[in-house]
Image (cartoon, helix red, strand yellow):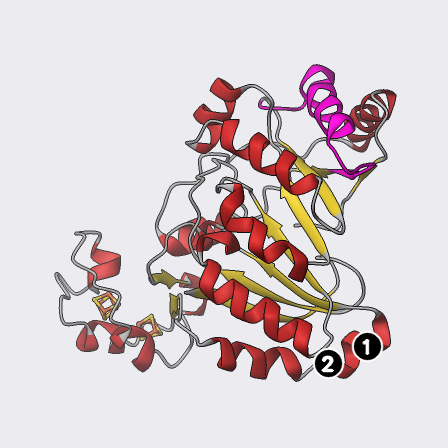
């Protein structure tokens, strides 16, 4: 199950890339920038600004009620059948999530193979959590390897290392998030403790070609020198290093996605950390002996 395939991406690794977004994640970070990638099931989304009020969706919806589609009536009877999307002339209704075969995905990936070669780019598998669909991910990684296309995987690493291990030889760059070293705080913010993540990242570090650890800096959650210093110390001690450490400032520009999906945005109102804050956190990380940079290109 995929959310989307994005072509000409410049922010998920080297060169020009195609980014394949897997659908489904076992973390539920309250600031998530890709809320459409959390559920494993297809989801309707309604973009009010595009709606021309024609009512075709209501006529097509098998569970419409009170002049509204099942999705917009909010009575939990929507079955994600897509009939509203099929008749929506203006593109205001979408169903996010499609099942695609590895062959169909590779057809899209191969369209840009000349660009990858010319720019040093490749394919990035993101999400959601790609490692929670290991059969599809494995097929795609093997096929990319067969075609000589460089690969990157972005993961929250909340999966047993035994799932990741057989795929590591096929991955050129592995990006793993480490959000907090405080397991209780981690669980409150993401729904899961951090123990499995730290174990998996440690095991992967010794075996992967290139590992980059990323920490999204979320105001009030992990934006102190003590929080970032603890993560930096963990990165510095990982086997197989040195590994690069990136700090990503929280952006908070995803509220429209939450509105379209009809789910509450718990991080609404949080501000983006200032450049000064990011640079001081980065300096604190460097003091722990890691090569750290602030990455402002990820949204
Ligand atoms: S996806 Fe199907 S059930 Fe849901 S609102 Fe659209 S037409 Fe109705
Ligand atoms: S079919 Fe599309 S444009 Fe027409 S009312 Fe429904 S959502 Fe709006």
* Residue 220 magenta: no
Q: Residue 127 location, x and y as percent?
A: 53, 55
Mark 1: few, some, or many residues within 10 Å (few <14, many ≥20)? some
Q: Position of residue 297 (x, y in %)?
A: 75, 51
Q: Position of residue 100 (x, y in %)?
A: 43, 75
CA gap, disc 1 to disc 2? 6 Å
Residue 33 position (above or below residue 51): above
Look at 25% across and 59% down and name the residue there. 71
Query: Quarter of the image holding residue 69?
Result: bottom left
Residue 230 showing in the rendered view: yes
Q: Quadrant of residue 94?
A: bottom left
- Residue wearing tag 1: 117
Nearest the viewer among 93 and 22 is 22
Query: Which residue is tagged 2?
Result: 113
Write the residue at 44% across / 69% down.
Answer: 50
Residue found 69% across the figure and 79% down from its top: 147
Taking the image as shown, residue 262 lies to the left or right of residue 202, namely left
| Quadrant of the image occupied by residue 266 | top left
Q: Which residues are magenta?
A: 221-246
Residue at disc 2, secondary structure: helix
Query: Mark 1: which secondary structure?
Result: helix
């Amino acid at each position: 199950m995929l959310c989307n395939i994005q072509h000409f991406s410049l922010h998920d690794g080297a060169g020009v890339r195609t980014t394949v977004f897997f659908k489904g994640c076992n973390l539920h970070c309250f600031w998530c920038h890709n809320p459409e990638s959390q559920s494993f099931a297809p989801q309707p989304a309604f973009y009010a600004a595009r709606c021309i009020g024609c009512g075709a969706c209501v006529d097509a919806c098998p569970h419409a009620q009170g002049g509204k589609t099942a999705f917009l009536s909010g009575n939990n009877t929507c079955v994600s059948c897509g009939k509203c999307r099929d008749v929506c002339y203006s593109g205001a209704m979408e169903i996010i999530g499609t099942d695609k075969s590895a062959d169909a995905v590779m057809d899209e990936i191969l369209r840009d193979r000349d660009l990858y070669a010319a720019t040093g780019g490749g394919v990035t598998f993101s999400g959601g959590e790609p490692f929670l669909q290991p059969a599809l991910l494995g097929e795609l990684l093997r096929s990319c390897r067969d075609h000589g296309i460089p690969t990157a995987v972005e993961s929250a690493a909340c999966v047993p290392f035994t799932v990741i291990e057989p795929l590591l030889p096929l991955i050129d760059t592995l990006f793993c998030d480490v959000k907090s070293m405080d397991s209780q705080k981690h669980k409150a913010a993401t729904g899961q403790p951090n123990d499995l993540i730290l174990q998996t990242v440690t095991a992967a570090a010794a075996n992967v070609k290139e590992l980059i650890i990323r920490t999204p800096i979320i105001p009030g959650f992990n934006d102190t020198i003590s929080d970032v210093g603890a993560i930096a110390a963990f990165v510095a001690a990982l086997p197989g290093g040195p590994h690069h450490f990136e700090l990503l400032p929280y952006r908070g520009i995803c509220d429209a996605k939450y509105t379209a999906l009809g789910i509450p945005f718990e991080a609404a109102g949080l501000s983006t950390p200032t450049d000064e804050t990011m640079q001081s956190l980065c300096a604190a990380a460097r003091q722990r002996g890691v090569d750290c940079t602030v990455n402002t290109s990820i949204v």
